[in-house]
Amino acid sequence: MHVGRDGIRRAIPQAFVPGLAVRHLDAPTARLTLRICNHAHIERAYGVAVAEGVVTRIQHRLAGALPVAADIAVRPNGVLTVALWTDRAVGGDVVDALLPEWLTAFCTAAMHEPVTIGAVAICVWLSGDWVSPARQGMRICPFCGPPIGEEIEAGAHYRADMAIVANLLPSLLRAPSDTNLADEPAPVLYWQPVVNDSGAILYDEALCRPRHSDDGVVPPEPLLRALERLGFACVLDRFVVSAVIDALEAAPDVTLAANVSAQSLSCAPSWGDVLARLKQRPDVARRLIWEITETAIVRDMEQATSFVSTLRALGCRIAIDDFGVGNASIGHLLAFSPDIIKIDRLFLDRATASARDAAIFRQLVELARSFDAEVVAEGVETRLHADLVASTGAAWQQGYFHARPSPTRWWRREREPRAPGALMRRDGR
Ligand code: G
Ligand code: MN
């Protein structure tokens, strides 16, 4: 990078298309705006100087990584504007075709590589707006998280969440592991089946276990909530869904589910590579279930329903997870028309304690059924629970009584080939 006569930092010109050197032109071929979407959050939580430091680091990363000559200018509020210069021979259409993909990769990579300033590591959410003669107003990696809270402690909460998240995100560049090693750095996937009372399996749900510690597995909930509060849920969700697709590709006759935060549904552009994989493999898409958990508020319902329609069109099935708690309303059931509704374990737990709560549980099962969905009762921990669920006619159950989550991919031991979509029995019947 060098500083030009105009005082603007200029990235070292590199050939964008091999063999074509960059010549300086009268006008740039494309302009993009790179935005640090959590800049206000960072400024509030860590102060102005740290936020400025983050901008400078991103500017340097960008200058070092841009594949074409560029003028980078720093604007207020965590915005960087970039004018790209390419050889006329390359053509605007080539730039348009290749650079958005490059920019997506740059923004995505930035999420996994926290900026360290002093002792703190900060994850940066970058989004790009792309303007070129051919493509007006293209948006890359829009941010789908909430603004920082107004309360006095908001900064401290943000710092605490960031400490957890910055520790995790670099490890998501690695593939998940299914080994049980205590020093395993990447998250581990556990699996838990959804069964009926005669042992048939509807599917196996992948449960992300962030890391092992000396006392076993670290519970994922604090991490999942921290990711949602920061607006980074879809980074982990993408990792888990990709790993579940890997597992589906490796086993042609199992059906598997991945948990996805409702927040990630508003992040449709971040799912490009996953959707492309599913489009290529309809046989895999048909065996993938997206379990949507509405612990975070859906900020853009229109985008969320359109993303769900895209998944459906690819052949995937949709489950609403933890129904009855969280933010999933009856309106959301209407909007998503899920294939599967999972009733949160709170209701079954209470149902064994009082007649009134048993009646509420039955009504919830009835309600879920009226959406023409398969109903799954969660949290079946005892024989009493299992019998109560069976008495409501809810076909499917999940819980410790039937099987605890386990890192073992039991289906690898299944020998006999089975018809796709056929239910499998753990006892081999
Ligand atoms: O939100 P979701 O339903 O995907 O959460 C599943 C979580 O519930 C997992 O962390 C899993 O370990 C846990 N879980 C699974 N079965 C049971 C159960 O029977 N009882 C309780 N308390 N937790 C369960
Ligand atoms: Mn789930």
Image (tube, rainbow, N blue to C red):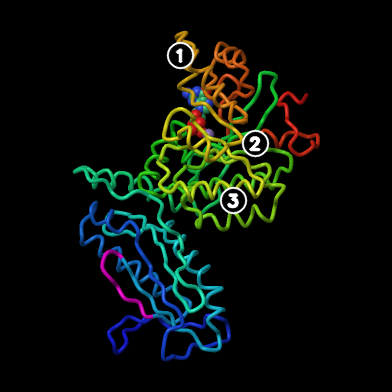
Q: Is residue 170 left or right of residue 5?
A: right
Does the magenta portion include 75?
yes
Q: Tell me the magenta residue range.
A: 71-78
Dot 1 or dot 3: first in sequence order is 3
Q: Which residue is mark 3?
A: 310
Q: Nearer the viewer, residue 307 or 285?
A: 307
Rounded to the nearest angstrom, the CA distance separating label 2 from label 1 is 36 Å
Q: Which residue is mark 2?
A: 409
Q: Is residue 414 above or below residue 90?
A: above
Rounded to the nearest angstrom, the CA distance separating label 3 from label 2 is 29 Å
Q: Is residue 365 above or below residue 272?
A: above
Rounded to the nearest angstrom, the CA distance separating label 1 from label 3 is 37 Å
Q: Quadrant of the C terminus?
A: top right
Residue at the farthest top position? 355
Badge 3 marks a residue whose secondary structure is helix
Badge 2 marks a residue whose secondary structure is loop
Determine the residue positioned at 36% across, 64% down.
Answer: 35
Dot 3 or dot 2: first in sequence order is 3
Residue 61 x/y as whole percent: 39, 69
Q: Nearer the viewer, mark 3 or mark 2?
A: 3
